[in-house]
Amino acid sequence: MAKNRFEREWTDSPTAPVYYLDLIKHRDVSNAVEDKLAVKHESPQVLVIKNGKCVYHASHNAISGKEILEASI
């Protein structure tokens, strides 16, 4: 549901490429992301990474395409 809502709201941006990671199946990647960015893993979750730092994160119903785009500029 959160992914579908995000996809409806998202406007493609050349400054913000989007990657989908299935971290339930790849817990080792989830743990590495959590350790490196100091953001607790939740699912579903969106992270905006700039210069190696998490500048925005949201999960579940708080995921907003508009807010993601604003954070990525």
Image (cartoon, rainbow, N blue to C red):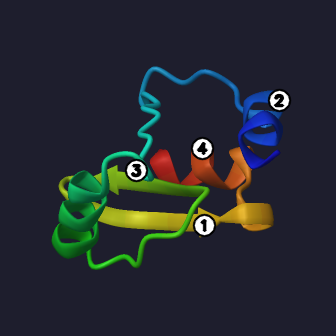
Q: Quadrant of residue 7?
A: top right
Q: CA distance from mark 4 to mark 1?
A: 13 Å
| Secondary structure under the numbered disc 3 in the rendered image | loop
Chain-order first, disc 1 or disc 2: 2
* Residue type (three-letter) at the residue carrying disc 2: Arg
* Residue type (three-letter) at the residue carrying disc 4: Leu
Residue named by callout 1? 58
Using the image as rendered, state which of residue 40 and residue 23 is in the foreground. 23
User: Pointer 4 and pointer 1: residues touching (CB < 8 Å)?
Assistant: no
Examine the rendered structure and indicate whether residue 45 appears above or below residue 7: below
Q: CA distance from mark 1 to mark 2?
A: 17 Å
* Residue type (three-letter) at the residue carrying disc 3: Leu
| Secondary structure under the numbered disc 1 in the rendered image | strand
Name the residue: 71% across, 44% down.
65
Residue named by callout 2? 8
- Which of discs 4 and 3 lies nearer the camera? The answer is 3
Chain-order first, disc 4 or disc 1: 1
Examine the rendered structure and indicate whether residue 73 appears above or below residue 56: above
Q: CA distance from mark 1 to mark 3?
A: 15 Å
* Residue type (three-letter) at the residue carrying disc 1: Ala
Q: Residues within 10 Å of mark 2 (few under 14, many from 20)?
A: few
In the displayed structure, does residue 64 sit left or right of residue 70? right
Q: CA distance from mark 4 to mark 3?
A: 22 Å
Residue named by callout 3? 23
